Image (tube, helix red, strand yellow):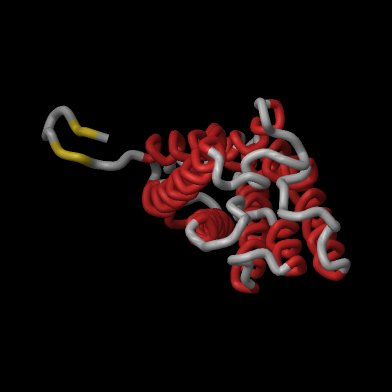
């Protein structure tokens, strides 16, 4: 953010909050695709990766991944210091999620959503061109990193006596349920050698998990407690 008094560029914790909210909005585009023309649970951008809208979603996924990394970096460097241990775990897990998401979006193959483990497993089982074990493992890592980050954030807000901890805890519970369901679905598709249909698609379950990921990023951005540092430096060091 430009500093008008010095005409220099500097970063503020509010930039991190904006980045997290923007990432949540961009990740939500994958969910919104289902209501757009040509979309649906069994077709759409992932089933037709060469379409214009498919390429648009590929680009937005990379942008969202970069925004997540920016938000995590600013949280680590400029965020609150209270109950710092759990908050550090949350920020580092968020950074890992962003980095993994960016990496998977650059890999060959039909899967563009980093958390779509079912897609990676199905692509491997059906021998889809470009599918790899590395992408499947990175997809699992992305799911785990996102879940770890929201759980750590819930614990951080609880230890800081922030009333928002309950909302974050609910988000963590929903994400845990959908994450387990996605991993189970991935296992079923892999061991059954795919679903019998050519190609891969982003199903309703995967979209539901993306909703919980977007809600986690939204909560990370709108809840102020994990961003604002205490005015009392000694208290901050004592809480560290």
The quarter holding residue 168 reads: top right
Residue at horizontal 55%, vertical 40%?
51
Give the image location of residue 99, x and y in percent.
48, 59
Give the image location of residue 143, x and y in percent.
67, 57
Residue at horizontal 81%, vertical 67%?
190
Give the image location of residue 35, x and y in percent.
70, 26
Q: For the N terminus, which image quadrant?
A: top left
Direction from residue 67 to residue 12 in the image, left or right:
left
- Seen in the picture, residue 31 relative to 69 is either above or below; the reply is above
Give the image location of residue 203, x and y in percent.
77, 44
Q: Is residue 172 visible?
A: no
As drawn, the residue found furthest toward the left would be: 6
- Seen in the picture, residue 223 relative to 124 is either above or below; the reply is above
**Towards the viewer: 118 or 64:** 118
Q: How many marks?
A: 0
- Seen in the picture, residue 138 relative to 91 is either above or below; the reply is below
**Towards the viewer: 230 or 209:** 209
Residue at horizontal 52%, vertical 45%?
58
**Towards the viewer: 17 or 231:** 17
């Amino acid at each position: 953010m430009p500093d008008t008094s010095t005409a220099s560029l500097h970063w503020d914790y509010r930039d991190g909050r904006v980045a997290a909210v923007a990432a949540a909005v961009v990740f939500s585009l994958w969910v919104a695709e289902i209501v757009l023309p040509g979309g649906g649970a069994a077709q759409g951008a992932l089933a037709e990766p060469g379409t214009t809208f498919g390429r648009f979603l590929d680009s937005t996924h990379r942008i969202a991944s970069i925004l997540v990394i920016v938000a995590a970096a600013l949280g680590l460097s400029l965020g609150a210091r209270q109950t710092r241990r759990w908050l550090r775990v949350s920020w580092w897990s968020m950074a890992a999620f962003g980095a993994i998401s960016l990496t998977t979006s650059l890999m060959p193959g039909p899967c563009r959503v980093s958390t779509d483990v079912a897609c990676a497993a199905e692509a491997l089982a059906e021998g889809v061109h470009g599918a790899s074990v590395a992408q499947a493992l990175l997809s699992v890592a992305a799911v785990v990193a996102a879940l770890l980050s929201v759980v750590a954030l819930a614990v951080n807000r609880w230890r800081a006596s922030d009333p928002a901890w309950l909302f974050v805890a609910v988000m963590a519970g929903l994400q845990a349920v959908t994450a387990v369901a996605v991993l189970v679905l991935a296992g079923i598709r892999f061991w059954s050698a795919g679903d019998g249909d050519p190609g891969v698609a982003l199903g309703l379950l995967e979209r539901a998990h993306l909703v919980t990921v977007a809600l986690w990023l939204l909560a990370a951005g709108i809840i102020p407690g994990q961003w604002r540092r205490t005015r009392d430096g000694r208290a901050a060091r004592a809480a560290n």
